[in-house]
C-alpha cells in the first residue's frame, strides 16, 4: 500500500529561510542549522527538527550558516557585514569577524581550525580560528559577489561561486586553478567529498561536475527554475527545489523524476540531505523548514510506520549509535529542552 | 470497511518549536558537557571589556530614554523603497521588534492603530 509523504514543518522563523546545513553524525545524533532573513539562525536536532536554540547577535539578515563536523561550532554570514562563530552547545557567540560588505557564505575546514568566508566584497577570506585577532588570508579574483564558498579535496582546495562563474583555487598557493563560466545565474553549489562531486544549479538545470577537475559529469533539467539541489550520500537520489514551490526527487543514475511534493507556500531556497540520507530538509521564502522522508513510510525520527499487527507508542530510533542505548537516554536527547516552558503545540500552517 | 488507497505516513508528534521565552541551548542538556576550545583572553583585555560594557549600558539607557521621549509625539518613519510614513508613537515591545503607533499616515490612507515592524524601518525622526 503506497503511503503519502508527511513533511514535518519546523516553525519559528519569521522571515524567509535562505540557507541550511547539517552537521556530521555525532554521538548525540546530527544537527541542522538554518539561516534566516530575520537575523536569528536556529539550531535544531537533525532527525526530528526539534528546536534546540537560537543564535542571537546578528543585526541583519543571515545569509549563510554552517556547522562543523561534530556540531560543536557554528558559523553564520550576515548582512550586518560580519561573520560570526558560535559555540553550538551553549549558543554563545565566540567570535565576530568584520567584513567590508554583506557576507554570504561560511565554511569550516574538517578540523574546524579555519573558516572560509565570502560575500559581496568579492573576496574569499580564510580565518585561522586559533588566532582570531590575526588578519585573514585573502583571495581576490571574483568580479561579482561571492554566493557560496566551500573547502574541497580535504581542505587543499577551495570552490567558490559568484553570479556567473564557479572557480577552483589551490589553498596553499592561493591561486586560481580552473574556472567554469555560465550564461545563467548560479543559484547554488554543493560539494560531496565521497566521490569529489560538485552539484551546481542554474536556471532550470541541475549539473554535476568533478570537484577536482570541474569537468562535467551529467546534468538534468527541472520543470521550473531551481534554487538548490542536494545529492543523496549514497548517490541514489537527488532532490531539488525552486521557484514553483515544489520539491523534486530524481533518480541520480537515470535522471528519471521519481516524485514531486507540494507543501511550501513560497519558493524553496535551500535543500539538503541529512548525513545519513534518511531525510532531506528544505528552507523556503514562506519562513519554514520542512523535513521530508527519503523512503516514505519508513519508521525514522518522528515518522512512525504503523503496520496492522504492530504495537504503537515507542519513540522511533534513528540509525545512529549512541554511547548508551537505553530508551530513557533517547528520550532525553529528543527532549533536550524539556525544562523550558513550552507554549502549546507549535502553530502549523496547513 | 474499505481502506483508502493511500494514507499519509503517521507521525508521533510535530517538531518542537522555539519556546518564545529563552534562546534555548538547555544548560543541563546532554551536550552541556562538551565545550569547544576557546582562545584565552589576555588580562589587559578584561578591563577593556568592562569599559565596553559600561559604554554599552550608557548607550542603551540613552536609547530607552529616547523612546520614552517619543511617546505621544508625531514621528516620521523612513521605510524600504523610499516610503515615508508619519504616525503618533505609542509604545514598543520588549525586544524593540515592533512599534505600536496610531494615526499612521500611509500612501493609501490613514490607519487608526497599527504595528510597525522594526525590521522594516530604516530610520525615524521626531522633534521632542
Image (cartoon, grey):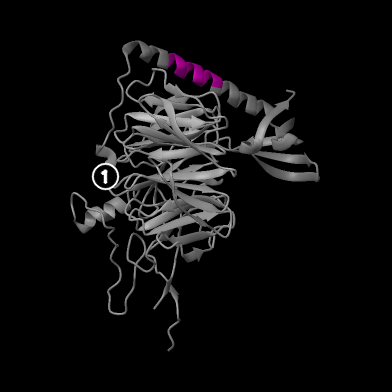
Other-residue count near label 1 (Cα within 10 Å), few / some / many at <14 / 14–19 / ≥20: some
Residue at point 31%, 79% (across, down): A308
Q: Does the magenta stretch include residue B51?
A: yes
For the residue pair B67 and A348, the one nearer the viewer reads as A348
Q: In this view, does A20 lie to the left or right of B79?
A: left
> In the displayed image of the protein, which residue is found farthest to the top?
B44
Query: Total of numbered circles in the picture?
Result: 1
Quadrant where the C terminus of chain A is found in the figure: bottom right
Q: Position of residue A155 (x, y in %)?
A: 34, 34
Is the magenta region chiefly helix, strand or loop? helix
- The answer to whether residue A268 is visible is no
For the residue pair A38 and A210, the one nearer the viewer reads as A210
- The answer to whether residue A74 is visible is yes
Which quarter of the picture shows residue A184?
Answer: top right
Identify the residue position indicated by label 1 in the image: B30
Q: Regarding mark 1 in the picture, which secondary structure is present there?
A: helix
Residue at point 37%, 69% (across, down): A297
Query: With respect to residue A238, does B78 lie above or below?
Result: above
Query: With respect to residue A287, does B119 lie above or below?
Result: above
Q: Position of residue A31 (x, y in %)?
A: 35, 47
Query: With respect to residue A31, does B42 lie above or below?
Result: above
Magenta-drawn segment: B50-59
Query: Please, which chain is the residue tagged with disc 1 on?
Result: B
> In the displayed image of the protein, which residue is found farthest to the bottom?
B1
Residue at point 52%, 55% (across, down): A241
Q: Is residue B7 magenta?
A: no
Amino acid at each position: 500500500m503506497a503511503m503519502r509523504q508527511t513533511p514535518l514543518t519546523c516553525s519559528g522563523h519569521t522571515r524567509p529561510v535562505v540557507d541550511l546545513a547539517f552537521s556530521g553524525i555525532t554521538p548525540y545524533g546530527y544537527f541542522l542549522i538554518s539561516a534566516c532573513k530575520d537575523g536569528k539562525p536556529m539550531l535544531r536536532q537533525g532527525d526530528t527538527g526539534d528546536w534546540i536554540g537560537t543564535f542571537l547577535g546578528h543585526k541583519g539578515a543571515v545569509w549563510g550558516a554552517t556547522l562543523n563536523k561534530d556540531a560543536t561550532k557554528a558559523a553564520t554570514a550576515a548582512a550586518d557585514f560580519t561573520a560570526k562563530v558560535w559555540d553550538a552547545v551553549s549558543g554563545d557567540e565566540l567570535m565576530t569577524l568584520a567584513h567590508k560588505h554583506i557576507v554570504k557564505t561560511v565554511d569550516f575546514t574538517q578540523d574546524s581550525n579555519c573558516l572560509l568566508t565570502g560575500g559581496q566584497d568579492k573576496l574569499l577570506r580564510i580565518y585561522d580560528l586559533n588566532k582570531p585577532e590575526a588578519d585573514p588570508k585573502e583571495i581576490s579574483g571574483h568580479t561579482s559577489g561571492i554566493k557560496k564558498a566551500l573547502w574541497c579535496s580535504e581542505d587543499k582546495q577551495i570552490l567558490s561561486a559568484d553570479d556567473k562563474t564557479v572557480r577552483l583555487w589551490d589553498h596553499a598557493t592561493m591561486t586560481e586553478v580552473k574556472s567554469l563560466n555560465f550564461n545563467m545565474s548560479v543559484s547554488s553549489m554543493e560539494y560531496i567529498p565521497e566521490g569529489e562531486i560538485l552539484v551546481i544549479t542554474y536556471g532550470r538545470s541541475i549539473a554535476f561536475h568533478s570537484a577536482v577537475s570541474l569537468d562535467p559529469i551529467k546534468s538534468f533539467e527541472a520543470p521550473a527554475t531551481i534554487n538548490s539541489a542536494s545529492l543523496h550520500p549514497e548517490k541514489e537520489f537527488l532532490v531539488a527545489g525552486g521557484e514553483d514551490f515544489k520539491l523534486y526527487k530524481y533518480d541520480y543514475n537515470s535522471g528519471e523524476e521519481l516524485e514531486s511534493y507540494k507543501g511550501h507556500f513560497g519558493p524553496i531556497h535551500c535543500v539538503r540531505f541529512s548525513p545519513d540520507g534518511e531525510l532531506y530538509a528544505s528552507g523556503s521564502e514562506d519562513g519554514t523548514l520542512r523535513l521530508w522522508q527519503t523512503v516514505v513510510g519508513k519508521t525514522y525520527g518522528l515518522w512512525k510506520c504503523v503496520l496492522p499487527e504492530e504495537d504503537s507508542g515507542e519513540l522511533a530510533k534513528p540509525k545512529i549509535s549512541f554511547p548508551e542505548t537505553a530508551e530513557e537516554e533517547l528520550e532525553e536527547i529528543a527532549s533536550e529542552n524539556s525544562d523550558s516552558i513550552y507554549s502549546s503545540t507549535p502553530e502549523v500552517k496547513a | 470497511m474499505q481502506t483508502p488507497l493511500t494514507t499519509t505516513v503517521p507521525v508521533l508528534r510535530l517538531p518542537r518549536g522555539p519556546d518564545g521565552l529563552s534562546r534555548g541551548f538547555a544548560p543541563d542538556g546532554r551536550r552541556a558537557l562538551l565545550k569547544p576550545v576557546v582562545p584565552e583572553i589576555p588580562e589587559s583585555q578584561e578591563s577593556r571589556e568592562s569599559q565596553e560594557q559600561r559604554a554599552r549600558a550608557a548607550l542603551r539607557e540613552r536609547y530607552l530614554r529616547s523612546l520614552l521621549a517619543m511617546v505621544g509625539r508625531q514621528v516620521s518613519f523612513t521605510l524600504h523603497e523610499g516610503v515615508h510614513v508619519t504616525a503618533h508613537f505609542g509604545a514598543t515591545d520588549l525586544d524593540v521588534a515592533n512599534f505600536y503607533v496610531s494615526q499612521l499616515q500611509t500612501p493609501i490612507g490613514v490607519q487608526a492603530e497599527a504595528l510597525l515592524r522594526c525590521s522594516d524601518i530604516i530610520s525615524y525622526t521626531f522633534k521632542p
